Amino acid sequence: MNIALWIAQALLALMFIPAGVMKTFQPNKVKSTMPWAKDASTGYVAFIGLSELLGGLGLILPWATDIAPVLTPIAAIGIAVIMLFAAVFHARRSEYSSIGMNVIMLALALFVAIGRF
């Protein structure tokens, strides 16, 4: 089970850390490439990016370093909440092709949260 949890954590981190870095530090580039970001403020895109970046780091660092490991399942819950909101957001904008990946990442994050608590 520990190996499966680490694989899920690594997959999520590999998706959220680079995406978070790009949205946090290059929000204008994101606004030119992602349809939803064109309608959002630069600050909103950067906030989402920072949330994703910190969540991705929180999935790995606390458990790997054994420093406050309780933060890993909390980060997983945060990622799950972000994915739930993202799915609702995309559904409201009729961007249905994005919802599938949101649901998969939501499921992985819940798996990590439950497995690490």
Image (cartoon, helix red, strand yellow):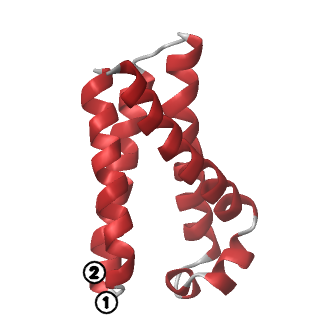
Which circle marks residue 94 in the picture? 1
- Residue 99, compared with residue 108, is above or below; it is below
Residue 31 x/y as whole percent: 64, 81
Residue at 52% across / 32% down in the picture? 58
From what the image shows, is residue 23 above or below residue 29? above
Q: Categorize mark 1 by other alpha carbons within 10 Å: few (<14), some (14-19), many (20+).
A: few
**Are dots 2 and 1 in contact, CB under 8 Å?**
yes
- Which element carries disc 2, helix, strand or loop? helix
Residue topped by disc 2: 91
Image x and y of residue 27, in percent: 69, 71
Quarter of the image where the N terminus is located: top left
Describe the element under mark 1 as helix, strand or loop: loop
Q: What is the C-alpha distance between the residues marked 2 and 1?
A: 5 Å
Between 108 and 36, which is closer to the camera in this rendering?
108
- Along the viewing direction, whichever of 16 and 47 lies nearer the viewer: 16
* Rendered-image quadrant of the C terminus: top left
Q: Amino acid at mark 2?
A: Ala
Q: Is residue 53 above or below residue 57?
A: below
Tag 1: amino acid: Ser
Residue 63: give x, y in percent of width and height: 50, 18
Using a 10 Å C-alpha cutoff, classify the residue at mark 2 as few (fewer than 14 neighbours), some (14 to 19) or many (20 or more): some
Number of labels in the image equals 2
The residue at the far top in this view is: 66
Whether residue 40 appears in this view of the structure is yes
Left or right: where does residue 49 sit relative to residue 71?
right
The answer to whether any part of residue 81 appears in the image is: no
State the image quarter where residue 100 is shown.
bottom left
Q: Quadrant of residue 25?
A: bottom right
Q: Is residue 63 above or below residue 49?
A: above
Q: Residue 66: x percent and y percent?
A: 53, 10
Residue, x 48% and y 13% (percent of image)?
Answer: 68
Residue displayed at 28% across by 49% down: 107
